[in-house]
Image (cartoon, grey):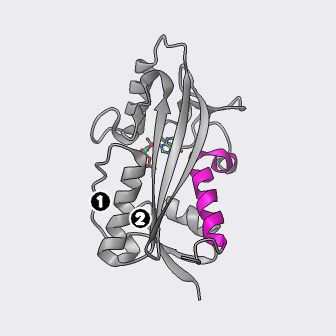
Amino acid sequence: MKENIVFATHNENKLEEIRNILKGWDVVGLHDIGCHEEIVEDADNLQGNAKIKADFVTNNYHLNCFADDTGLEVEALHGAPGVYSARYAGEGCSYHDNVVKLLDAMRGETNRRARFRTVIALNLNGEQYFFEGIVNGRILEDEHGEGGFGYDPVFQPEGYDETFAEMPMEIKNKISHRGRAVQQLVEFLSTSAWSAH
Ligand code: IMP
Protein backbone atom coordinates (compact mmCIF):
# COMPACT_ATOMS: atom_id res chain seq x y z
CA MET A 1 0.00 0.00 0.00
CA LYS A 2 1.23 3.50 -0.83
CA GLU A 3 2.13 5.72 2.10
CA ASN A 4 0.29 8.98 2.51
CA ILE A 5 2.12 12.29 2.50
CA VAL A 6 0.74 15.84 2.46
CA PHE A 7 2.17 18.54 0.22
CA ALA A 8 1.24 21.76 2.04
CA THR A 9 -0.10 23.67 -0.94
CA HIS A 10 -3.42 24.84 -2.34
CA ASN A 11 -1.86 24.95 -5.82
CA GLU A 12 -3.28 22.10 -7.93
CA ASN A 13 -0.56 22.49 -10.61
CA LYS A 14 2.21 21.98 -8.08
CA LEU A 15 0.37 18.95 -6.69
CA GLU A 16 -0.09 17.37 -10.08
CA GLU A 17 3.58 17.93 -10.92
CA ILE A 18 4.71 16.20 -7.72
CA ARG A 19 2.26 13.31 -8.09
CA ASN A 20 3.77 12.57 -11.49
CA ILE A 21 7.24 12.29 -9.99
CA LEU A 22 6.55 10.72 -6.57
CA LYS A 23 4.85 7.63 -7.91
CA GLY A 24 5.43 5.45 -4.85
CA TRP A 25 3.58 7.85 -2.56
CA ASP A 26 -0.01 8.94 -2.24
CA VAL A 27 0.48 12.72 -2.30
CA VAL A 28 -2.46 14.76 -1.05
CA GLY A 29 -2.91 18.53 -0.86
CA LEU A 30 -4.25 20.83 1.87
CA HIS A 31 -7.66 20.75 0.29
CA ASP A 32 -7.73 16.94 0.49
CA ILE A 33 -7.19 16.94 4.26
CA GLY A 34 -9.86 19.60 4.81
CA CYS A 35 -7.40 22.41 5.50
CA HIS A 36 -8.86 25.43 3.75
CA GLU A 37 -7.19 28.23 5.67
CA GLU A 38 -4.24 30.31 4.48
CA ILE A 39 -1.19 29.44 6.57
CA VAL A 40 0.53 32.67 7.59
CA GLU A 41 4.07 32.64 6.24
CA ASP A 42 5.72 35.31 8.35
CA ALA A 43 9.30 34.07 8.65
CA ASP A 44 12.06 36.28 7.25
CA ASN A 45 13.71 33.47 5.29
CA LEU A 46 12.67 30.67 2.94
CA GLN A 47 13.60 27.84 5.27
CA GLY A 48 11.48 29.41 8.04
CA ASN A 49 8.42 29.70 5.82
CA ALA A 50 8.74 26.15 4.51
CA LYS A 51 9.03 24.95 8.11
CA ILE A 52 5.95 26.96 9.21
CA LYS A 53 3.81 25.30 6.55
CA ALA A 54 5.07 21.76 7.12
CA ASP A 55 4.79 22.12 10.92
CA PHE A 56 1.28 23.53 10.67
CA VAL A 57 0.08 20.35 8.99
CA THR A 58 2.05 17.94 11.15
CA ASN A 59 1.03 19.64 14.40
CA ASN A 60 -2.66 20.06 13.52
CA TYR A 61 -3.30 16.94 11.49
CA HIS A 62 -0.57 14.58 12.74
CA LEU A 63 0.49 13.66 9.21
CA ASN A 64 3.77 13.42 7.34
CA CYS A 65 4.13 16.55 5.25
CA PHE A 66 6.44 18.59 3.06
CA ALA A 67 6.23 22.25 2.07
CA ASP A 68 8.21 24.51 -0.25
CA ASP A 69 9.08 28.18 -0.40
CA THR A 70 10.83 29.99 -3.24
CA GLY A 71 12.50 33.35 -3.71
CA LEU A 72 14.38 35.27 -6.38
CA GLU A 73 17.64 36.59 -4.92
CA VAL A 74 19.28 39.43 -6.83
CA GLU A 75 22.91 40.14 -5.97
CA ALA A 76 22.84 43.90 -6.68
CA LEU A 77 19.73 44.19 -4.49
CA HIS A 78 21.43 42.39 -1.59
CA GLY A 79 19.27 39.30 -2.00
CA ALA A 80 15.93 41.08 -2.56
CA PRO A 81 13.13 40.36 -3.29
CA GLY A 82 14.03 36.97 -1.70
CA VAL A 83 11.44 35.71 0.73
CA TYR A 84 9.18 38.64 -0.30
CA SER A 85 9.20 37.70 -4.03
CA ALA A 86 5.42 37.08 -4.22
CA ARG A 87 4.54 40.52 -2.81
CA TYR A 88 7.57 42.58 -3.89
CA ALA A 89 5.37 45.33 -5.42
CA GLY A 90 2.91 45.22 -2.50
CA GLU A 91 0.19 43.03 -1.03
CA GLY A 92 -2.13 41.70 -3.74
CA CYS A 93 0.15 42.77 -6.61
CA SER A 94 0.34 40.88 -9.90
CA TYR A 95 3.31 38.97 -11.32
CA HIS A 96 3.70 41.78 -13.82
CA ASP A 97 3.74 44.49 -11.12
CA ASN A 98 6.65 42.61 -9.52
CA VAL A 99 8.55 42.38 -12.81
CA VAL A 100 8.08 46.11 -13.46
CA LYS A 101 9.32 46.96 -9.97
CA LEU A 102 12.35 44.70 -10.41
CA LEU A 103 13.29 46.18 -13.79
CA ASP A 104 12.98 49.68 -12.27
CA ALA A 105 15.18 48.75 -9.33
CA MET A 106 17.78 47.30 -11.74
CA ARG A 107 17.82 50.17 -14.23
CA GLY A 108 21.44 51.16 -14.97
CA GLU A 109 22.79 48.33 -12.80
CA THR A 110 25.59 46.41 -14.49
CA ASN A 111 25.70 43.49 -12.04
CA ARG A 112 22.70 41.47 -13.26
CA ARG A 113 23.51 38.28 -11.31
CA ALA A 114 20.56 36.56 -9.63
CA ARG A 115 19.37 33.15 -8.54
CA PHE A 116 16.15 31.38 -7.74
CA ARG A 117 16.23 29.32 -4.58
CA THR A 118 13.68 26.80 -3.34
CA VAL A 119 13.72 25.26 0.11
CA ILE A 120 11.63 22.21 0.96
CA ALA A 121 10.93 21.23 4.57
CA LEU A 122 9.92 17.62 5.16
CA ASN A 123 8.39 16.25 8.33
CA LEU A 124 8.62 12.49 8.23
CA ASN A 125 7.90 10.14 11.11
CA GLY A 126 8.92 12.66 13.77
CA GLU A 127 12.07 13.91 12.01
CA GLN A 128 12.57 17.13 10.04
CA TYR A 129 14.67 17.38 6.87
CA PHE A 130 15.47 20.27 4.48
CA PHE A 131 16.29 20.23 0.77
CA GLU A 132 17.44 23.13 -1.40
CA GLY A 133 17.48 23.79 -5.13
CA ILE A 134 19.26 26.71 -6.79
CA VAL A 135 19.48 27.97 -10.35
CA ASN A 136 21.90 30.79 -11.12
CA GLY A 137 21.28 33.30 -13.86
CA ARG A 138 20.82 36.96 -14.69
CA ILE A 139 18.10 39.58 -14.85
CA LEU A 140 17.64 40.96 -18.37
CA GLU A 141 16.90 44.62 -19.15
CA ASP A 142 13.41 43.81 -20.40
CA GLU A 143 10.85 41.02 -20.75
CA HIS A 144 11.24 38.10 -23.16
CA GLY A 145 8.75 35.28 -23.74
CA GLU A 146 5.18 34.44 -22.88
CA GLY A 147 5.51 31.15 -20.97
CA GLY A 148 5.94 30.37 -17.30
CA PHE A 149 4.92 32.75 -14.54
CA GLY A 150 6.31 35.20 -12.01
CA TYR A 151 9.73 36.56 -12.90
CA ASP A 152 10.27 34.08 -15.75
CA PRO A 153 10.26 36.71 -18.58
CA VAL A 154 13.27 38.53 -17.09
CA PHE A 155 15.30 35.58 -15.74
CA GLN A 156 17.87 33.96 -18.00
CA PRO A 157 19.44 30.84 -16.48
CA GLU A 158 23.21 30.40 -16.77
CA GLY A 159 24.24 28.52 -19.93
CA TYR A 160 21.07 29.38 -21.87
CA ASP A 161 20.21 32.13 -24.37
CA GLU A 162 16.54 32.07 -23.48
CA THR A 163 14.62 33.24 -20.45
CA PHE A 164 12.55 30.77 -18.42
CA ALA A 165 9.49 32.25 -20.18
CA GLU A 166 10.92 31.34 -23.60
CA MET A 167 11.95 27.75 -22.94
CA PRO A 168 9.78 24.61 -23.07
CA MET A 169 8.35 23.76 -19.66
CA GLU A 170 10.09 20.34 -19.59
CA ILE A 171 13.48 22.04 -19.82
CA LYS A 172 12.64 24.65 -17.21
CA ASN A 173 11.39 21.96 -14.82
CA LYS A 174 14.61 19.99 -15.23
CA ILE A 175 17.00 22.84 -14.46
CA SER A 176 14.90 25.04 -12.20
CA HIS A 177 15.30 25.73 -8.50
CA ARG A 178 12.03 23.90 -7.73
CA GLY A 179 12.91 21.02 -10.06
CA ARG A 180 16.26 20.56 -8.35
CA ALA A 181 14.83 20.74 -4.82
CA VAL A 182 12.10 18.27 -5.77
CA GLN A 183 14.67 15.89 -7.31
CA GLN A 184 16.47 15.81 -3.97
CA LEU A 185 13.25 15.17 -2.07
CA VAL A 186 12.32 12.39 -4.48
CA GLU A 187 15.73 10.75 -4.21
CA PHE A 188 15.46 10.88 -0.43
CA LEU A 189 11.95 9.45 -0.30
CA SER A 190 12.83 6.80 -2.86
CA THR A 191 15.73 5.45 -0.85
CA SER A 192 15.55 3.85 2.54
CA ALA A 193 17.77 6.58 4.03
CA TRP A 194 14.92 7.83 6.20
CA SER A 195 13.53 4.49 7.33
CA ALA A 196 16.34 3.94 9.82
CA HIS A 197 14.86 6.71 11.98
P1 IMP B 1 6.30 30.19 -4.05
O1 IMP B 1 7.02 30.05 -2.76
O2 IMP B 1 6.45 28.99 -4.94
O3 IMP B 1 4.85 30.60 -3.87
O4 IMP B 1 7.00 31.37 -4.85
C1 IMP B 1 7.03 32.71 -4.35
C2 IMP B 1 7.16 33.69 -5.50
O5 IMP B 1 8.42 33.51 -6.18
C3 IMP B 1 6.12 33.54 -6.60
O6 IMP B 1 4.95 34.27 -6.29
C4 IMP B 1 6.84 34.11 -7.81
O7 IMP B 1 6.77 35.51 -7.81
C5 IMP B 1 8.28 33.71 -7.57
N1 IMP B 1 8.57 32.42 -8.24
C6 IMP B 1 8.59 31.19 -7.67
N2 IMP B 1 8.93 30.25 -8.57
C7 IMP B 1 9.12 30.91 -9.74
C8 IMP B 1 9.48 30.47 -11.06
O8 IMP B 1 9.67 29.28 -11.34
N3 IMP B 1 9.56 31.44 -11.98
C9 IMP B 1 9.34 32.74 -11.73
N4 IMP B 1 9.00 33.20 -10.54
C10 IMP B 1 8.88 32.29 -9.54
Q: Quadrant of the N terminus?
A: bottom right
In the picture provided, is 58 more to the left or to the right than 112? left
- The residue under the point 36% across, 72% down is 58
- The residue under the point 38% across, 44% down is 45
In the picture provided, is 182 more to the left or to the right than 53? right
Name the one closer to the observer, 57 or 139.
Answer: 57
Amino acid on which the number 1 mark rests in the picture: Ile
Q: Are circles 1 and 2 on residues that touch, CB within 8 Å?
A: yes
Seen from this angle, which residue lies furthest bottom? 1
Badge 2 density bin: few <14, some 14–19, many ≥20, Cα 10 Å: many
- The residue under the point 41% across, 20% down is 105
| Residue 39 in the image: above or below residue 107 | below
Badge 1 density bin: few <14, some 14–19, many ≥20, Cα 10 Å: some
Spot occupied by residue 5 in the image (x, y as percentages of width and height): 49, 75
What SS does tag 2 mark?
Answer: loop
Q: In the rendered image, which residue does mark 1 sit on?
A: 39
Chain-order first, disc 1 or disc 2: 2
